[in-house]
Image (tube, rainbow, N blue to C red):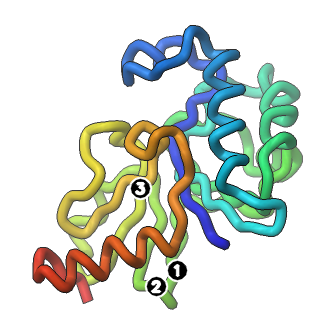
């Protein structure tokens, strides 16, 4: 299966209050996010992280390596505005690939962190993070962030079903 997720913000105490996350501290949040992730993602699945894995820099590389190592699947990263490590660092901690954005042309979907660019391309669907709980769906954008999905990743099948339902209702048709 293919999964999407965003905005984990590992090791960030402030995000708990900012997003009203139900965790007592960043360690508890990290454990909870990994548990919920692994409830969905199998070892042979692929997962696209759409940015903001952590705000921390290279001093947390070892800790981030430990967390990413506990997460199932083949992992790909779309860089977010808070991702501070080098591409090489992300590859060394377990990501198969690192991108600034990525087109899934067979699905007419573009993966980005910040959805601002989406509105200039209304003929495509965009999956994003960055907006936390601001919205789940807006025009041709779907938010795959943990804050709107009960801290779980979201599957490509779920996204296809959601898009098909919107198109049936003629609410949007970016094709």
Around disc 3, counting alpha carbons within 10 Å, would you say few (fewer than 14), some (14 to 19), or many (20 or more)? many
Nearest the viewer among 148 and 120 is: 148
Separation of disc 3 and disc 2 at Cα? 15 Å
Nearest the viewer among 74 and 93 is: 74
Separation of disc 1 and disc 2 at Cα? 6 Å
Query: Which comes before the other along the chain, label 1 or label 3?
Result: 1
Residue named by callout 3: 128
Q: Secondary structure at mark 2?
A: helix
Residue 121, percent across and down? 26, 75
Q: Residue at 78% of width from left, 32% of height from top? A: 64
Q: Residue furthest top?
A: 24
Q: Residue at 37% of width from left, 38% of height from top? A: 132
Q: Are marks 1 and 2 in contact (CB under 8 Å)?
A: yes
Residue named by callout 2: 107
Residue named by callout 1: 104
Q: Quadrant of residue 9?
A: top right
Around disc 2, counting alpha carbons within 10 Å, would you say few (fewer than 14), some (14 to 19), or many (20 or more)? few
Q: Quadrant of residue 98?
A: bottom right
Nearest the viewer among 173 and 93 is: 173
Q: Residue furthest front?
A: 39
Query: Which comes before the other along the chain, label 3 or label 2?
Result: 2
Residue 78, percent across and down? 58, 56
Residue 112 as seen in the image, left or right of residue 133: right
Instruction: Using the image, determine if residue 60 lies above or below residue 104.
Output: above
The quarter of the picture where the N terminus appears is bottom right
């Amino acid at each position: 299966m293919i999964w999407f997720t965003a905005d984990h913000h590992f090791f960030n105490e402030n995000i708990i209050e900012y997003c009203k996350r139900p965790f007592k501290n960043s360690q508890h949040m990290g454990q909870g996010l990994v548990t919920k992730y692994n409830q969905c993602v199998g070892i042979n699945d692929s997962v696209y992280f759409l940015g903001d894995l952590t705000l921390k820099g290279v001093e947390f590389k070892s800790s981030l390596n430990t967390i990413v190592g506990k997460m199932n699947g083949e992992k790909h990263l779309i860089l977010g505005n808070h991702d501070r490590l080098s591409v090489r660092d992300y590859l060394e901690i377990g990501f198969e690939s690192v991108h600034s954005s990525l087109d899934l042309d067979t699905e007419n979907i573009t993966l980005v962190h910040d959805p601002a660019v989406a509105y200039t391309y209304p003929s495509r669907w965009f999956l994003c993070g960055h907006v936390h709980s601001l919205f789940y769906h807006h025009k041709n954008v779907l938010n795959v962030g943990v804050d709107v999905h009960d801290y779980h990743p979201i599957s490509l099948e779920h996204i296809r079903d959601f898009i098909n339902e919107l198109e049936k209702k003629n609410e949007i048709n970016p094709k």
